[in-house]
Amino acid sequence: MTRFAMGFEPAAARRSWWAVWLAGVAGLCLGAAALFAQGLDPSALLRPATDTWPTYNGDYSGRRYSPLDQINAANIGALTLAWVYRARGAEIKSTPLEVNGILYFTAPDNVWAVDARYGREIWHYHRPSEGDHIGHRGVAMYGEWLYFTTPDAHLVSLRARDGRVRWDRELADPKLGYFSTMAPLVVRNHVIVGVSGDVTDIPGFLDAVDPATGELQWRWYVEPAPGEPGSETWPRNSDAIRHGGGMTWMTGTYDPELNLLYWGTGNPNPVLAGQARPGDNLYTCSIVALNPDTGKLVWYFQPSPHDVHDWDAVETPVLFDAPFGGEPRKLLAQASRNGFFFVLDRTNGRHLLTAPFIDTNWTAGIDSRGRPIRNPDMDPRPDGALVEPASDGATNWMSPSFDPQTGLFYVDARRVFSIFYLTATGKPEGWAGRDRGLWANSTIRAIDYRTGRIVWDHETGPGENSAGILTTAGHLLFTADNEDNLLALDPATGKTLWHLNVNDRLSGSPMTYELDGRQYVLMAAGDTLYAWSLPAGAAAP
Amino acid sequence: MRRWIGSGARGRGDRRVRALPYACGVVAGLTAFSWMLAQAASSGPAERGRRQFQQSCGFCHGADATGARGPDLVRSKVVAHDVNGNLIGEVIRNGRPDKGMPALPLSADQIRDVAAFLHERAREALASNRVPAVYPLARLLTGKAEAGKAYFSGAGGCNACHSPGGDLAHVASKYPPLELEARMLYPRGAQPASVTVTLASGEQVSGRLLHLDEFMVSLREASGWYRSFPRDRVKVEVRDPLAAHEALLGRLTQDDLHNLFAYLETLR
């Protein structure tokens, strides 16, 4: 299934496979259709229709590539506004879901349902809360229900038709420093949900909860229990492993054929002080493959062993099937916050490629397992260490994209320098220091996944970027620069095909859907959601 | 403080005379205020709690409450949920016999003070993701000033734009240490970039660069008027006086950085 959903496949094979798939699934869906009415049958997530965007990344692969091509490189110049929706002061960093003509998107404490054709608000849910309001990525949907995480680390289930609360469960104790910003992921009858919070030294975990009741199905702790495999990467006779951090704050991806869930984990704690936690500190700053039914770890790969710079490895683990080394492979690729691009065999976690996607100064080479080797000269210190990249990283939450038409992986990257000060005296706790930013410059980069070679580079201006990326079958790449311009680029060359100054930053990721034969591309800048399409009635070439 | 008034007022003639009583008043006020703060800190509940804690609890939980034989209380769930000693007091009064902690005969006031101390310790950990604005110079001074001086005029090439007796005279007195270190590396906004735009006609327009992106460039001319141009129809030449700093960021070793900083700190 995923081989076809995610890879390069001849059109004929795709059609014949579709026939088999439809025959097999139709029977199952008939019964479910009545049950889910205008909601979302979770089996639809296996092959999202082009009139929906039913999960954070659009589909399980995390490629953020849409097969829609009505808006394309030939007609992009005619792009016009279909409608605008303003969230009145709330910065929209989330990716909207679109199901049955309704958009669902978020900001901390807020969920909106908006008509996907006309931009009219259907309902708005507001739940004031304590906790960190740094941002919010969006909701998940199962049947007629939405799943929304909160700054006080709750998971709230809302009825999609009117935004009424069905239940509201605490995921983790907010008094200990937990909060949650991520968009949960639905896999069959599991709602997979993660947590944030690295200011206090609390353990990270990933939960699966029952979609109907919110009851816990399993919890996977980022730190193994003492004595379990991985615990040897923490000091013995110390409480470090129980306070090791590793937050699960970005939405992962899923391969239905392998039945594996892929998730990135955050930095270890105390954040900048590694001396109290010698060792690799598994499974922080890692990409892990879990069984979604049991929460058991199947394999792992660690982009930043023993991190001391806050370089979470939570960036989307993107899944695609493509040739590598002359053979068709099931791949997983991540452009990680530490500045390195990793390609793995996602069936077993075997490392295939490590390559820098931007300049960094913190490594002393790559080890035999494909992991960057930390240069201790670049560790935070009381008198300051000049390091590239800064703690915000060479990239961050902004969505990357993989375009099967070009075979290129796209990342919103930046060069950024800062000085890391280790300020703790006595036993380090919490962050135990901080970096002070000096200079940054941003760029969109296209990476050849087979070699790590940068195929093109499109500068997006001084400072740190925040725009995610969408590619489409219309030979378009949607993103934005640091100067308030929304952009459509040629994914093959990086050349600009369309732009518009909207006087605010894109801080989320673009998404697209087609309704009544009309394709829409949505991009949120600041508190405003813009829906772009071709002029109504214009015939698509 | 006093040094600032002295040097700042020098050379301003009789204005110094009028400013002096006012300045003295401000200094006296500030001194009194900081004294009051210091008194509050040394006699407030958190400070009393610190002494009480060290005496009654420090042996097991560590003098700074980060744990020894007993657990780390800065990261404690009980402390996180406690309000004015309501939960901490329970543990102190009853002990934790199952874990070997005896009950302690502290008064209600003493318990409130200990709770105030533990909450302050937790707040300190929460605030540890910031570099304190006042950061001890001694911790930053790990380099060799002589080596820094050599780098300034040698490999660093700093002397191409700067001189210790000119623009950098007394620079260490002008900025707090952390600020000086950051500005030494990249003095953001210190000097604006200038730009020359050449139009298709050959006409040239120069001024202070206001905005530059892929699509347009704008500038302010010496006359004060704003001008903007499309990038695809003009030639743009930017002169960024900070370009050398940008290049240096990628070249500096940690030793260069600390040596250079130690040298700048001698320019008082």
Image (spheres, rainbow, N blue to C red):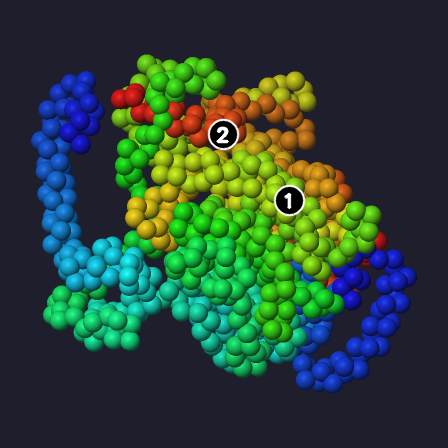
| Residue in the image at 61% along x and 30% along y | B229
Is B74 on the left-hand or right-hand side of A14?
left
The numbered disc on residue A295 is none
Identify the amino acid type marked 2. Answer: Leu
Separation of residues labelled 1 and 2 (CA atoms): 30 Å
A203, B183: nearer the viewer? A203
- For mark 1, what is the residue? A368
Is B14 on the left-hand or right-hand side of A212?
left
Q: Position of residue B179 (x, y in %)?
A: 35, 33
Label 2 crowd (10 A; few <14 / some 14-19 / many >=20): many
Choose mark 1 or mark 2, whichever is in front. 1
Is A375 on the left-hand or right-hand side of B76?
right
The quarter of the displayed image where residue A176 is located:
bottom left
| Residue in the image at 29% along x and 72% along y | B99
Quadrant in the picture for the N terminus of chain A: bottom right
Visible in this render: residue A236?
yes
Q: Position of residue B109 (x, y in %)?
A: 12, 67
In the rendered view, tell whether residue A400 sits above or below residue A445. below
A93, A534: nearer the viewer? A93
Is A367 on the left-hand or right-hand side of A128?
right
In the rendered view, tell whether residue A220 sits above or below residue B156. below
Same-chain status of marks 1 and 2? no
| Residue in the image at 87% along x and 72% along y | A19
Identify the amino acid type marked 1. Answer: Ser
The quarter of the displayed image where residue A460 is located:
top right
A434, A276: nearer the viewer? A276
Chain of residue at mark 1 = A
Q: Position of residue A246 (x, y in %)?
A: 49, 58
Chain of residue at mark 2 = B
Label 1 crowd (10 A; few <14 / some 14-19 / many >=20): few
The numbered disc on residue B249 is 2
Q: Position of residue B6 (x, y in %)?
A: 16, 24
